Amino acid sequence: MLLLCNGRTALAETEWLQSGRLGVAEIRALCERVSDVELLARKQMISTGNARWRLLSRQDLVIEATVMGVPPLNPGRCYVIVRAGQSERERRAFEVRDFTVNPERILVFIVGRDYDPPPKP
């Protein structure tokens, strides 16, 4: 009800930004400010990979970080580093393809293919 009375909603002000159309500085600024990962992107992460990954990611999928690529990943791209599984664990990195941005938050909306993640610091 509050949103209807307000006249402006954050949803109405949301932009969808494709990372392929952004410069490295713009991607870096968005990547540093990501506050969450949309359900669609989570489902994409679960559905990729082999049967083992799909099983582990259905048990538990934890977002560790959103980071700009470090070798061997492309340093000009943003990645979501995730951990899947409970007793057995596996880590993967997913390239961010699209962000949704509104005044309240920046979300990862669509992810691309998965990669081996960089080693933990």
Image: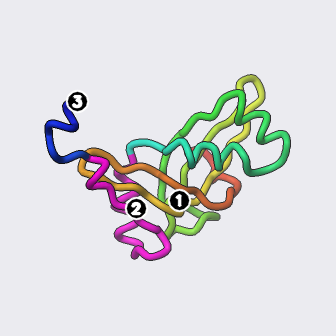
Q: Say which residue label 1 marks.
A: 96
Under tag 1, what secondary structure? strand
Residue depicted at x 39% and y 63%: 28
Q: Quadrant of the N terminus?
A: top left
Residue bounds of the magenta highlight: 10-34
In x, y percent, where is residue 18? 46, 68
Q: Say which residue label 3 marks.
A: 1
Lateral position of residue 51 relative to residue 119, left or right: right
Given residues 110 and 76, the one toward you in this image is 110
In x, y percent, where is residue 23? 40, 76
> How many neighbours does mark 3 have within 10 angstroms: few (below 14), some (14-19), or many (20 or more)?
few
How far apart, in angstroms, are the residues tagged by discs 1 and 2? 12 Å
In x, y percent, where is residue 44? 65, 49
Residue 57 found in image quarter: top right
Q: Which mark is residue 59?
A: none
Callout 3 touching callout 2 (CB < 8 Å):
no
How far apart, in angstroms, are the residues tagged by discs 1 and 3? 34 Å
Residue depicted at x 61% and y 64%: 73
Q: Say which residue label 2 marks.
A: 16
